[in-house]
Amino acid sequence: MTPATSGGDPSAPATTAHTTIDPAAGDIVTPATRAAPVVLRVTRLSKSYGDTPVLHDINLDVRRAETLCLIGPSGSGKSTLLKCLNLLEKPQAGEIRLGETCLTAPHADVDAARARIGMVFQHFNLFPHMSVERNVTVALTSVKGMDREQARALARRHLDEVGLAAFAGQRPGRLSGGQQQRVAIARALAMEPELMLFDEATSALDPELVKDVLAVMRDLASGGMTMAVVTHEMGFAREAADRVAFMCDGRIAEIGTPDRIFERADHPRLRQFLSQVL
């Protein structure tokens, strides 16, 4: 970590040419990220399964147009944290705020909250008896109450965005795994979410199918979509993320820019992890 320059205010954050180090947050962010408003704020979040704690006192902000990648060994709590963010898992303690809305408040409207958050899972969860287009439009018409023709136009636009407009009339079973995952991404995008969550979206794919899905995710990141991504694809995290958070034992052990995480890691467990996966 770069020390503060001598002669300045010792209480001020240390600076380098490209990043700011906030000692209170223990974080490094780019100036553009720091200036953006917070979309999602997690405060002191904890989660247990029975007597087994899986998340410990998690504090995390995700800012508008930021791509945050969560990396770490299996069983470190990454997917559980992501599922807590859209309340698929209920935390035992802590607070989750999406904008000004507290999602963990006792009387929070969970369905309304989930409509503001898109999620793409390891498995595609497409309806096999519906066409690709209908898989995208079903939530638009049934949840948002959108007119069928308007929903179809929106579905076509997002299918085109992921390179699958020509497959709108096909059943999912006629598509490759990578194509099905891109349909799942189009379905989530069609809901016009404020935040997109990706839970190891490429881990169930054959290696040769991963590239196209990652390309779509890179395009979303460069286009300004706010994203939190659990991934084992270190190349994607290094290239596309604004920040990378390393999790182990249910905690965020280190967080910072890709350069810091991959080139100047502080935490010994992170250094050990990177030595095994890079």
Image: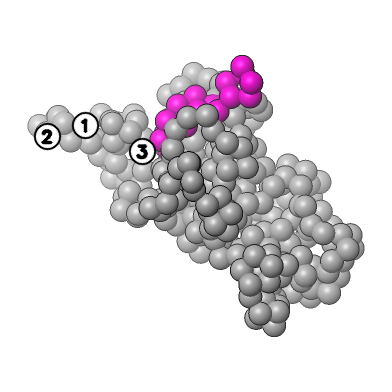
Residue 155 drawn at (x, y percent): 68, 73
Circle 1 is placed at which residue position? Answer: 4
**Three-letter amino acid code of the residue under disc 2:** Gly
Quadrant containing the N terminus in the rendered view: top left
Q: Residue at x 25, y 39 (%)?
A: 15
Please state if 262 lies on the left or on the right of 156 as rendered: left
Q: Nearer the viewer, mark 3 or mark 1?
A: 3
Asked whether the beta carbons under mark 3 and mark 1 sit within 8 Å of each other, the answer is no
Q: Residues within 10 Å of mark 2 (few under 14, many from 20)?
A: few
Please state if 39 lies on the left or on the right of 271 as rendered: left
**Front one among 268 and 191:** 191
Name the secondary structure under disc 1: loop
Asked whether the beta carbons under mark 1 and mark 2 sit within 8 Å of each other, the answer is yes
Circle 2 is placed at which residue position? Answer: 8
Residue 168 drawn at (x, y percent): 79, 73
Q: Nearer the viewer, mark 3 or mark 2?
A: 3
Residue 51 drawn at (x, y percent): 61, 17
Magenta region's main secondary structure? strand
118 falls in the magenta region: no
Q: CA gap, disc 1 to disc 2? A: 8 Å
Q: Residues within 10 Å of mark 3 (few under 14, many from 20)?
A: many
Q: Residues within 10 Å of mark 1 (few under 14, many from 20)?
A: some
Q: CA gap, disc 3 to disc 2? A: 19 Å
Q: Residue at x 28, y 31 (%)?
A: 24
Residue 102 drawn at (x, y percent): 43, 46
Circle 3 is placed at which residue position? Answer: 28
**Front one among 221 and 104:** 104
The image quadrant of residue 70 is top right
Q: Is residue 97 visible?
A: yes
